[in-house]
Image: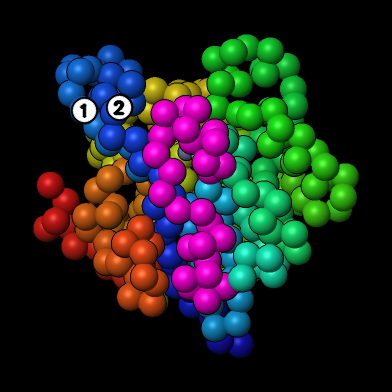
Amino acid sequence: MTETIWRIYGIRHAINTGRTRGQNFILEAQPDAPLVLDFYSWVLISEDRTIVVDTGMDPAKAARHGHTHLLSPVVALAELGVEAASADTVILTHAHYDHLGFLDAFPQAHFHMQAEEMAYVTGPWMQKPWFRRAYEPDEILRLVSLLHGGRLTLHGREARIADGVTVHWVGGHCAGQEVVRVRTARGWVVLASDALHYYEEYERGVPFAVVFNSSDMIAAHDTIRALADSDDHVLPAHDPRIARIYPRADRAGSEHILRLDLAPDPGNAA
Ligand SMILES: [Zn+2]
C-alpha cells in the first residue's frame, strides 16, 4: 500500500495588530513593544481526501475580542475546491473560540477532539474565570450537541485520524491541547496549534501567557521536536512570521491561504 502524502493549507482567518509582547509573554522584558497576533486554521488535502483542522473564528466573537476577521473557512475551502457543506472529517485541536467558529458550516462532518478537553470545558476548572476566558459557552453547547448526536469522537491521548495524520496530546495551553502530525512530501510536519503561538516560545523555551499548566506547556516543546522532522517542520498557530516564510497557495486567490507543506524560506523570517 502506498503511503498517503498530504498537502497542508494554512488559512490566516484573523489578525490583531494591537497586541503587545507583555500580553503574549510572562515576565516580558519589553512589555509595551508591539507583537502582531495572527490566527490560523488548516486544511489537509490528499489525492482523495480532505481533513479540516480547526474551524476558524466567528466574526462577531472576533470583533468582541478586538480581532479583525479576515476569512471564513467556508470561503477559504471554496478557494481550494472543497465544499465545507460536504466535508466529512474535522479535527478540533482544542475548544478555544478562535479555533471553534463555524461549526455549523460542516453539517456532514464527523468531529474529533481530545476527551480531556471535553472534560475540562465542562468540568470544575470552568468555575475559574482565568481558565474559561477563551471559551464561548454557546460553542461548548454545540460540542455537547454534536457528542449526543453521534458526530463527535472524544479520543485518548494519541489517535490516528487517517494514514499519515495522527493527533498527540500535549496539554499546557489548555487541558486537552493536541498537536497534529502530518506526512508531507518533505517529511513529517507538526501543526503545533496553540501548543505554540509563536516560534519564539519554542526557540527561547518560554510559555505563552494564556496557560492552564506551564510545565506541560514547556514539555510540549520536546514532544513537538520528537514528532517533527526538523524545526523547519513545525507550525505555530498565531505567528506573523509564518506569512513571511511560507509561499501563498497558488491555487487560491486569497493572500491569506498559504502552502505549509512546502519548505519555508527562513531568509524572510525577520
Ligand atoms: Zn488559538
The image's mark for residue 34 is: 1
Q: Earlier in the sequence, mark 2 or mark 1?
A: 2
Looking at the image, the residue that sits furthest to the top is: 128
- Dot 2 falls on a residue whose secondary structure is loop
In the image, taking residue 158 as reference, residue 130 lies left or right, namely left
What sort of colour scheme is used for the picture? Answer: rainbow
**Magenta-span inclusion, residue 120:** no
User: Looking at the rendering, which quadrant does residue 228 occupy?
Assistant: bottom left
Pick the front one: 225 or 140: 140
Labels 2 and 1 touching (C-beta < 8 A): yes
Image point (39%, 72%), residue name:
252
Looking at the image, the residue that sits furthest to the bottom is: 1
Image point (50%, 27%), residue name:
64
- The answer to whether the residue bearing label 1 lies less than 8 angstroms from the nearest atom of ligand 1 is no
Q: Amino acid at mark 1?
A: Pro
* Residue 125, position as x, y percentages in the image: 67, 17
* Residue 258, position as x, y percentages in the image: 35, 63
In the image, taking residue 101 as reference, residue 269 lies left or right, namely left
- The answer to whether the residue bearing label 2 lies less than 8 angstroms from the nearest atom of ligand 1 is no
- Span shown in magenta: 57-82
Residue at which label 2 appears: 19
The image's mark for residue 110 is: none
